[in-house]
Image (cartoon, helix red, strand yellow):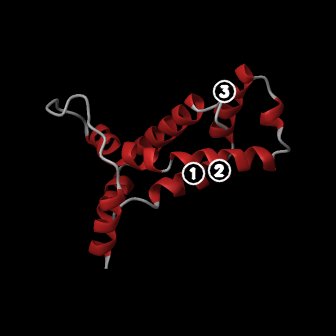
Amino acid sequence: MSVERSQQLLSIRLTIPTATADVVTSDSERFQNITLRPILKFQHELLLQLFRHYAVRKKNVFFQLAMERRSSYIEKVLSTDLNFRNELKGVIIGHFTTEEYLLYTANTTALNKRIFGMIKERLLSSVTEI
């Protein structure tokens, strides 16, 4: 059953060309390029919606901020709200194949840093869409 799930997940995953396919990269960087980037791109709209919902739950404070203050609000939320971080992480991990999950569990700390760095960049670059 997991082979079928893995095949289905991979079949819907976007292909993102990497800048330097022939350059030697670390396992974490390879995982980021092959697995995380396509998943985050695929989940982009959902990530934005999750943040919108979060902001509404927090009394719409985000929407009352000036545009230049919204970036620091996003950064603060992503660094302090563990429940929200876990929710975002689950949206990404849920798209891992079994094999990718095993790679993730072998290097959780480094890959979580990459995941949240990429989520932060996506939210910051889309702050006007939120």
Q: Which of the two labelled residues, at mark 1 and mark 3, occupies the earlier sequence position?
A: 1
Provide the residue designation for mark 3. 71
The residue under label 1 is 46
- Give the residue drawn at x 86%, y 44%: 59
Q: Residue at x 13, y 32 (%)?
A: 22
Q: What percent of the width, then of the height, locates residue 56?
A: 79, 47
Discs 1/3, front: 1
**Mark earlier in primary sequence (2, 3):** 2
Which residue extends farthest top? Answer: 68
Circle 2: is it few (<14), some (14-19), or many (20+) Cα within 10 Å? Answer: some
Q: Position of residue 33 (x, y in %)?
A: 31, 40
Type of residue at label 3? Ser
Quadrant hosting residue 60: top right
Distance between the alpha carbons at the discs numbered 1 and 3 = 19 Å
Q: Amino acid at mark 2?
A: Leu
**Closest to the observer, 85 or 61:** 61
Please give left or right for residue 126 compared with residue 43 in the image: right
Disc 2 and disc 1 in contact, CB within 8 angstroms = yes
| Element marked by disc 2 | helix
Residue 26 left/right relative to 68: left
Q: Which mark is residue 85?
A: none
